[in-house]
Image (spheres, grey):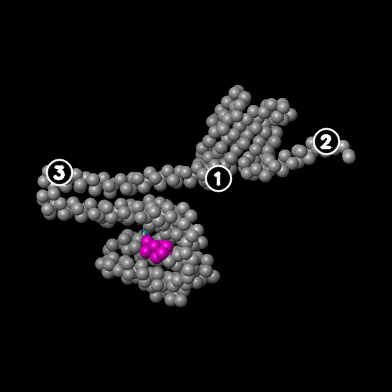
Amino acid sequence: MSQADPSEISRLADATCNVLLDGLTDAFLLCDQDTLICYANLAAKKMFPGRDLIGRSPQDLFPDSRFIELIDACRSMGSSVRRRLVLPQQLSPLGSLENRGENCWLIDLATLTKKDHPEARLRIMLRDLTAEHQSEQVRKDFVANASHELRTPLAIIQGYLENLLEDGGIRDVAQAQRFLQIMEKHTDRVVRIIDDMLMISRLESGEAASLRSEPFEILSCVHDVIERLEHMIHTQEASVDTSSIDPQLLIKGDRFYWTQILFNLVENALKQNPKVGLKVAITAEVKEGQIMISVTDNGIGIPTAHLPFIFKRFYRVDINHTNSAIKGTGLGLSIVKRAVEAHGGQICVSSMPLQETKFTITLPS
Ligand code: ADP
């Protein structure tokens, strides 16, 4: 049996090690006794593109005092240190190339001895936790916003209840009736906020994956929406033009969500423009191999500065609400966007106040 060549074994071991380290999604760096980088895996090279990492100090890569303090702490204690660090975009590795706002990193440091490695004295592992950090932030904001939105109508209901329960409050029948009507209006709002939140949560919690996928005529769906909004359309003397919808056009998807999508868009147009004579147009056609659905109105519109945010949860353009007795939930468009995306589509908006506010949905046909 032939004797294995020790230098060949060592070469193979090094190559295997490199393959393994380059397969990691985390950046992995080794520093020598002067704390200068002597090894960087592929993920580290990708994380700091266009920079030669070997021979540089890790502080150059993360110019943040907290990172430097962590290295100092690790070296002086001679033990491992693991910490999450949230950095502003400009201090993150990709600097001005970044567009994710804050970045979150898991920093994992450990000292090494001569027994561990002939040259390296410090191991640095960097994991990009930005996506997790951002979704955590969105969840926190959602809870804070939802609590705030629910608190306002509940505080009003509570106030009127206290008035009714006070001595004689209920004996003044006319006043009690008025209080009860106000309470009913705010109770309706609480119910609507909760219904909207449940729908968003269903769309986000994977129900989207189990959406029905049956073909139906988009025109029949539009008719259902108009029927539900009949009273509003009539009172506001609005017109809804559906003449450009191809009556044969079929959409494959979940009819319940498509009714909700179109309902929210048409209701918004009517809600934002209570003055008589609003013109709404709904179109649906196949264009360049894609299904295009649009809802257009000639009302008050959305100021350009607000356009990038209107699909965000709880976002409302307050100037549009000065005349309405009760605010919307700010969840309608966010439901629309999620439901459209769950069907593989996209939605965009353009607005020229008092001329044309147009929501356009594009779907693969
Ligand atoms: P809301 O419950 O307030 O209607 P949405 O998410 O449906 O919440 O809409 C967000 C904001 O976008 C609304 O507050 C409104 O100001 C604005 N908006 C939506 N559609 C229109 C429209 N057709 N015309 C003018 N403003 C609109």
Q: Give me the residue at 34% from left, 63% from top.
A: 267
* Residue tagged 1: 98
Q: Residues within 10 Å of mark 3 (few under 14, many from 20)?
A: few
Task: Report the magenta residues as a range.
Answer: 256-265
Pointer 2 residue: 7
Q: Considering only vertical position in the picture, is 361 above or below 70?
A: below
Q: Which mark is residue 166?
A: 3
CA gap, disc 3 and disc 1: 59 Å
For the point 41% across and 64% down, which residue is it?
256
Q: Earlier in the sequence, mark 3 or mark 2?
A: 2
User: Is 130 inside the magenta-drawn segment?
Assistant: no
Residue at the limit of the structure toward the right, as seen here? 1
Q: Where is residue 189, by image quadrant?
A: bottom left
Looking at the image, can residue 347 be seen? no
Q: Residue at x 48, y 68 (%)?
A: 214
Q: Main secondary structure of the magenta part?
A: helix
